[in-house]
Image: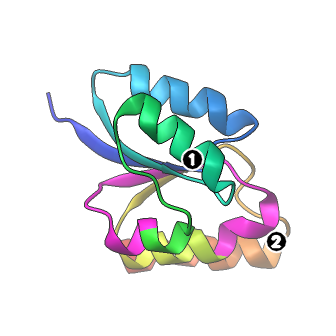
Amino acid sequence: MDIIKARMIGIGGFGHFALAAITASDRIESRAPADYDQELAQAKAQGLAIESYERYEDLIEKADIDGLSLSLPHYLYPPLVKLAAERGLHVYKEKPLARNFNEGLELVELDNLAS
């Protein structure tokens, strides 16, 4: 059974529950959480004995991972999904794909980057 190397971005609110599910799985290796609330990210990371990131972009650009789980406000998704697609990462987001039709089309087109 393959182990997925994943990281979590946005660990407040619903992200707290998603991080708990990720870390409880025997098929997912949680490498590091990221949150703009650096104290929260560091506390979660210490509890899991892993590193944390303050900047989401650093986590996506520098991480040795297969995918991301995103739990963020709607307006933060598009640039991070695009950056992840450019790196060929799988993305799970718990909210709708986009805030409007045009933004949805742009995000769907990112699939071409990952192919």
> In front: mark 2 or mark 1?
1
Tell me the residue at 25%/61% (across/down). Answer: 64
Which image quarter: residue 94?
Answer: top right
Tell me the residue at 55%/69% (across/down). Answer: 55
Question: In the structure shown, which secondary structural element does the residue marked by tag 2 occupy?
Answer: helix
Instruction: Please tell me whether residue 60 belongs to the stretch shown in magenta.
Output: yes
Graded by Cα atoms within 10 Å as few (under 14), some (14 to 19) or many (20 or more), the crowding at tag 1 reads many
Q: Upstream in the sequence, badge 2 or badge 1?
A: 1
Question: Residue 52 location, x and y as percent?
Answer: 45, 52
User: Residue under circle 1?
Assistant: 41
Q: Which residues are magenta?
A: 59-78
Q: Is residue 75 left or right of residue 105?
A: right
Please state which amino acid type lies under the numbered disc 1: Ala
Question: Residue 105 location, x and y as percent?
Answer: 68, 75
94 to 14, vertically: above or below:
below
Please state which amino acid type lies under the numbered disc 2: Phe
Which image quarter: residue 35?
Answer: bottom right
Question: Residue 81 location, x and y as percent?
Answer: 56, 68
User: Residue under circle 2?
Assistant: 101
